[in-house]
Every structure is written in structure tokens, then in C-alpha cells.
Amino acid sequence: MGTEASTACTDSDIAVLMETTKSWAQSVTDQDWAKFVGYWDENAVLMPPGHQSIEGRDNIQAFVQGEVGPVSAFTFTDWQFECSGALAVVSTGFDAGTVAGKHVIVLRRRADDSWAIIRVIYNANG
């Protein structure tokens, strides 16, 4: 499966969504928590495997800092995009060195045309 897009996603949307996703992942690799939290909406929800949902970007940051060990790099595969108005859904496969899996990221367009993460759910491949 390659890169797929709905007709509602423009090429520009896809480019920005891909860059946002990669930069967000890089902030985890760099352990740049100030940058990391900036990608999240204030009321975002993270739904990690084996845990209750984590609400709010400060709680998400605390969880990731405490639960996610060092990550050497993220590689993404199987990009898929869906856009509708101010919302976008990005799903990919990922390899973070010690774990490979898939995730779904829901983003909302901000007034400045950047995208804020509002939901993330992920799990490891079996």
C-alpha cells in the first residue's frame, strides 16, 4: 500500500500533514518536550495500548516522558489521508526502532493553517 488520499485532501494539505507528523515524531526522538507539546491541542486525547485515555496536552506530555523510552528514529509507511473541512485523519505504519506498529492521528486545522493533534491511537504489530 502506498500513499493514498481522499479527494478532499489537497496536495498542499498532504505535504503539511506529512511534515507535521514527521516533525512531531522527531520531537519525541529529540526528547524536545516543548516542541512535542506544541503539536497537540490543549484538549487532545492520547489512547495508548493497555492504558486509559490520557486527556490534555500536559498529561500527554507527562505520560510520554515517563512511559516512552529512548527512540532512535521513526520511519513511516503506508501513509493514508482523509480530509473534511477543518479535520484530517492521518494513518501510517511506523517503526520506532524497538517497536513497529500503526497509528491513527486526528488533527484540526488552526487559524494559521497549521494542524493541531486532537486524537492519537496506536498499537504495536503482533
Image (cartoon, rainbow, N blue to C red):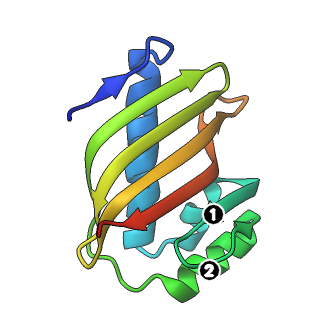
Visible residue check, residue 39: no
Please report the residue visible at 46 percent of the width from the left and 82 percent of the height from the top: 68
30 sits left or right of 37 in the view = left
53 sits left or right of 80 in the view = right
**Amino acid type at mark 2:** Phe
Pick out the residue farthest to the top.
Answer: 7
Please report the residue visible at 69 percent of the width from the left and 33 percent of the height from the top: 110
Distance Cα–Cα, label 2 vs label 1: 9 Å
Is the residue marked by circle 1 packed among few (<14), some (14-19), or many (20+) residues within 10 Å?
many
User: Circle 2 — which element?
Assistant: helix
x, y percentage for residue 88?
A: 56, 32
Quarter holding the N terminus is: top left
Task: Quickly name the residue at label 1.
Answer: 46
User: Circle 1 — which element?
Assistant: strand
Please report the residue visible at 43 percent of the width from the left and 54 percent of the height from the top: 103
Task: Quickly name the residue at label 2.
Answer: 63
x, y percentage for residue 7?
A: 44, 11
User: Do callouts 2 and 1 mark residues in contact (Cβ within 8 Å)?
Assistant: yes
x, y percentage for residue 85?
A: 66, 19
